[in-house]
Image: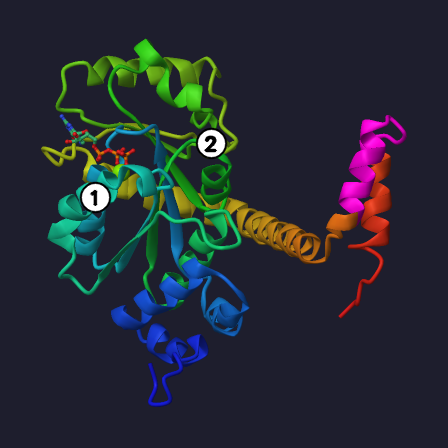
């Protein structure tokens, strides 16, 4: 807060963000989370500097061991000299509260390292949706010089899918016992994997799950969009408890990026991500315009006509939009 009592404009935080200052990043992300147009000039400035980071989505059903694995993976990437940002998407925590605290405690070993930035996203912004703030946050930490961004999401729900689709590399985590409750298949995330991980490899049933996953992939039951002539998603076993396989996972993630770079897939994904974000932003703007300009008097009048079966809902919607939202459009 400045001397006049007004909050520092978000744009003024940007130079500090670009220097990688943790407090500036955290402050900007709080504004990003709230949403609103005040933060747009800052995001525009940040966006110009982003685009270098490798964005890695880590997804899987609740309790599959994502946070534990992300913690170990981040430590391994640090050992390799990389700066790592962890963004955890946790839409359930406003209700449970415990998950984030648990994550923080487990990730505690990393928090004093300035080469690591950790943030959880739990609240939906005023404009609704979790995907937008998280994708904006990816830009912020990217521009701040973090060269790997690990985004943890529970692989269910529209927001989550939108976030996962914005990753360059997607790691799908399955806990042992896959055959029993089909986990990731049920969640519909198996086919988006660039790298498969069977977590909790210290458990005796992990080996069987690895074998089952490999069989499924060989039979094409989880035909991967990531599969190309030169790249096949590997199946790795990791244990956050013993650290087994974490090194291989870091290798596999790096290998996937190199393979994408060679084949041109990385550019295709960047283009797809940019286009999706543009469409999502446009939809958001339309929704805002609708919310701002909808004429509720006409809504009530048209509802009466619907009840009299006088007009079909779609025709009524066309009339409503034409008279209100679409009529007084000022094209900027
Ligand atoms: N045996 C064993 N247990 C593990 C391992 N990794 C995680 N767990 C346990 O699995 C449970 C869930 O771990 P988390 O890392 O919180 O899993 P998560 O997927 O992040 O969970 P949510 O964020 O709630 O979806 C915890 O009780 C962990 O102790 C592992 O490598 N071995
Ligand atoms: Mg977690």
Q: Quadrant of the N terminus?
A: bottom left
Q: Main secondary structure of the magenta part?
A: helix
Disc on res. 103: 1
Separation of residues labelled 1 and 2 (CA atoms)? 25 Å
Instruction: Decide if residue 323 is on the left or right side of residue 73.
Output: right
Closer to us: 53 or 283 = 283
Please name the residue shown 45% across and 65% down the image. 50
Q: Is residue 199 above or below residue 270?
A: above
Q: Is residue 134 above or below residue 156?
A: below
Nearer to us of marks 1 and 2 is 1
Coordinates of residue 101 in the picture (x, y in percent) = 19, 45
Q: Residues within 10 Å of mark 1 (few under 14, many from 20)?
A: some
Please name the residue shown 42% across and 58% down the image. 33
Instruction: Decide if residue 214 is on the left or right side of residue 76.
Output: right
- Is residue 139 visible in the rendered image? The answer is no
Q: Is residue 87 above or below residue 180?
A: below
Label 1's element?
helix
Is ligand 2 closer than 8 angstroms to the Cβ of mark 1?
Answer: yes
Would you name the residue on which mark 2 appears?
A: 192
Residue lying furthest bottom = 3
Chain-order first, disc 1 or disc 2: 1
Task: Specify the color scheme.
Answer: rainbow
Closer to us: 148 or 306 = 306
Disc on res. 246: none
Q: Is residue 242 above or below residue 264?
A: above
Coordinates of residue 78 in the picture (x, y in percent) = 19, 55
Coordinates of residue 22 in the picture (x, y in percent) = 26, 68
Q: Quadrant of the C terminus?
A: bottom right
User: Which residues lie in the magenta part?
Assistant: 298-313
Looking at the rendering, which quadrant does residue 293 occupy? bottom right
Looking at the rendering, which quadrant does residue 189 occupy? top left
């Amino acid at each position: 807060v400045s001397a006049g009592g007004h909050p520092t404009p978000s744009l003024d935080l940007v130079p500090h963000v670009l220097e990688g200052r943790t407090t500036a990043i955290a402050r900007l992300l709080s504004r990003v989370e709230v949403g609103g147009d005040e933060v747009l000039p800052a995001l525009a400035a940040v966006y110009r500097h982003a685009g270098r980071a490798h964005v890695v989505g880590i997804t899987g059903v609740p309790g599959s061991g994502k946070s534990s694995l992300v913690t170990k993976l981040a430590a391994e990437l640090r050992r390799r000299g990389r700066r790592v940002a962890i963004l955890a998407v946790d839409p359930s925590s406003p209700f449970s509260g415990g998950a984030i605290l648990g994550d923080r405690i487990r990730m505690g070993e990393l928090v004093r390292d300035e080469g690591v930035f950790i943030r959880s996203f739990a609240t939906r912004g005023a404009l609704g949706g979790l995907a937008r703030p998280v994708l904006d946050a990816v830009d912020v930490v990217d521009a701040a010089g973090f060269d790997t961004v690990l985004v943890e999401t529970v692989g269910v729900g529209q927001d989550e899918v939108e976030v996962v689709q914005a990753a360059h590399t997607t790691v799908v985590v399955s806990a042992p016992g896959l055959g029993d409750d089909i986990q990731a298949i049920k969640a519909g995330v198996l086919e988006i994997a660039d790298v498969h991980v069977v977590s909790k490899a210290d458990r005796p049933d992990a080996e069987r799950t690895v074998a089952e996953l490999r069989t499924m992939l060989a039979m094409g039951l989880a035909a991967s969009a990531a599969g190309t002539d030169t790249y096949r998603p590997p199946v790795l076993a990791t244990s956050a408890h013993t650290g087994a396989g974490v090194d291989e996972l870091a290798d596999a993630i790096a290998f996937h990026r190199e393979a994408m770079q060679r084949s041109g897939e990385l550019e295709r994904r960047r283009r797809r991500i940019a286009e999706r974000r543009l469409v999502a932003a446009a939809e958001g703007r339309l929704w805002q315009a609708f919310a701002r300009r909808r004429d509720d008097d006409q809504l009530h009048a048209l509802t009466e006509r619907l009840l009299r079966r006088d007009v079909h809902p779609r025709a009524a919607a066309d009339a409503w939009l034409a008279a209100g939202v679409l009529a007084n459009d000022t094209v900027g």
